[in-house]
Amino acid sequence: MGQQMKLVPKMIQSMEILQLPLLALQERIDQELESNVALEQVEPGMDVATEKPRDEQHPEERRDKADTESAETFERLRQLERSYGDFFDNDTGRPSSRLAGERDKKMDAMANAPDRGASLVDQLRQQWSFAEPPAENFEAGNRLIEYINDDGILGADVDTILDQSKNLPGVPWSKELLEDTLSLLQQSLEPRGLAARNVRECLLLQLEDLIEAEPDPDKAEAWDDARRLIADHFDDLVQNRLPKIAEKSDLAIDRIQRAKALLRKLTLAPGRDLVPPDVRPIIPDVIVEYDPEKDEYTARLPGHVLPDLRVSPEYAKMARDKAVDLKTREFVSRNVRSASWLIDAIHQRKQTLLRVVNVVLARQREFFDYGPQFLKPLPMVEVAEQLGIHVGTVSRAVAGKWLQTPRGFAELRKFFSGGLETASGEDRSWEAVKAILKEIVDAEDKRTPMSDQTIATKLKERGVDIARRTVVKYREQLGIPPARQRKQH
């Protein structure tokens, strides 16, 4: 004998639905509407038809009505088998890949949607074919293009590419061939900077074109200064050691500053110009509003985002009709059960999400009033105990969810973190500490930026006592460079 705990399909589906962000949930519902014949989207006017209650009907009237419904049911089944006999998998009840017939409106909309466009490799190979290089260079160029990453930079050195390509037939592979082909690629591909070995070479390729195309001698001189900075003083430039560059190059600080400003017009990732990143829109899962009369923040779900769903009454009746053959009734029952589970899971998701957000609103009131510097520690375990649910349920409820608040969009997970107690006895979350750190750095004199130790001292003056290495970690997480690179000469 032994004890086992298994998750029933309904519970698994409920956890999956709870974890999905709103955009992913919309896609999941669309898939279910396509695949589940018993799931319907409630449209205006669908429930207008009414009938006399069953207990008020005469026995003969009920019998005649039952005969009529039975005939209609069998007729629907015959139409279902003729139309969808090869569509459904008999084991799972889900659509097979053998669907043949007219496309519905949703499929037409998907077909008419713009595609994602050609990949970077495909676009570069097309450009390379238009360049019409010699046959040997053409094949070698196609091989080099395979190593270009999404930024447009060559992802491996020539020796590595040669070692991984020398056994491929049709080309007399050599380092000289690859070097010559790489140079042809850099001159042929657009935008300039593609196929560079590194960021430095990428910038130099762009500067060559700009210097040649600049008709103004004064601006051409500034572009040439920028080229000198990249070619001869790249490391010092990255570290913002402008006085050292001035000492080595005999250029005045103002000329270096002018050239440095021009470099901001260049791109470090020319490949992104051809294939921009796929940025998905943010759809808030919960909307937080301020009620001035009650002086409180309230949460509500966005309306008209998710469709209203119901189990088809016809298929629900068919699943209970003993006159329907067993095979069809089992198929319909599976779909009715799956549709009911999905509707319940979506309802439970809404309720759980609102309960969690209401706890956040009560605990993080100061954040909504004054800003991120006043975020308090809020462990998920504490929320789970308060709501009487498992901590894993809280984790799934906040995963990937966004709030629309009077302070803009905020990721729900950012409200859940540990923290510390300040010198005044107040609780501050780690996100609040980061916000205070950023505020201190933004207010510093950029001519004499503060060191990490100075920032730690400033934080201590505001009641936040953390070590210098913690300041370094948070500064890097916020994308703030060290003091040397923040300095304005």
Image (cartoon, rainbow, N blue to C red):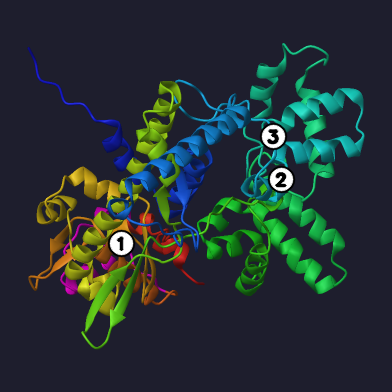
Q: Nearer the viewer, mark 1 or mark 3?
A: 3
Q: Would residue 81 appear left or right of 473 to someone viewing this image?
A: right
Cβ–Cβ under 8 Å for marks 1 and 3: no
| Residue 465 part of the magenta segment | yes
Q: Secondary structure at mark 1?
A: helix
What type is the residue that disc 3 sits on? Gly
Q: Nearer the viewer, mark 2 or mark 1?
A: 2
Observer-nearest of 483 and 459: 459
Measured Cα–Cα span from mark 1 to mark 3 = 67 Å
Observer-nearest of 329 and 104: 329
Magenta range:
448-473
Query: Which residue is rendered at x = 60% and y = 27% of the image?
Result: 97
As displayed, is residue 459 above or below residue 144?
below
Query: Which residue is rendered at x = 39% and y = 26% of the image?
Result: 330
> Looking at the figure, which quarter contains the N terminus?
top left
Q: Position of residue 460 (x, y in %)?
A: 18, 69
Most common secondary structure along the magenta stretch:
helix
As displayed, is residue 443 above or below residue 310?
below
Q: Would residue 477 appear left or right of 164 to someone viewing this image?
A: left
Cβ–Cβ under 8 Å for marks 2 and 1: no
Q: Secondary structure at mark 3?
A: loop
- Residue designated by label 2: 117
Measured Cα–Cα span from mark 2 to mark 1 = 45 Å
Q: How many marks?
A: 3
| Residue 379 part of the magenta segment | no
What type is the residue that disc 1 sits on? Asp
N-terminal of the pair, mark 1 or mark 3, is: 3
Asked if residue 312 shows in the view, the reply is no
Query: Which residue is rendered at x = 71% and y = 18% of the image?
Result: 165
Q: Secondary structure at mark 2?
A: loop
- Residue designated by label 3: 101
Q: Position of residue 363 (x, y in %)?
A: 17, 67
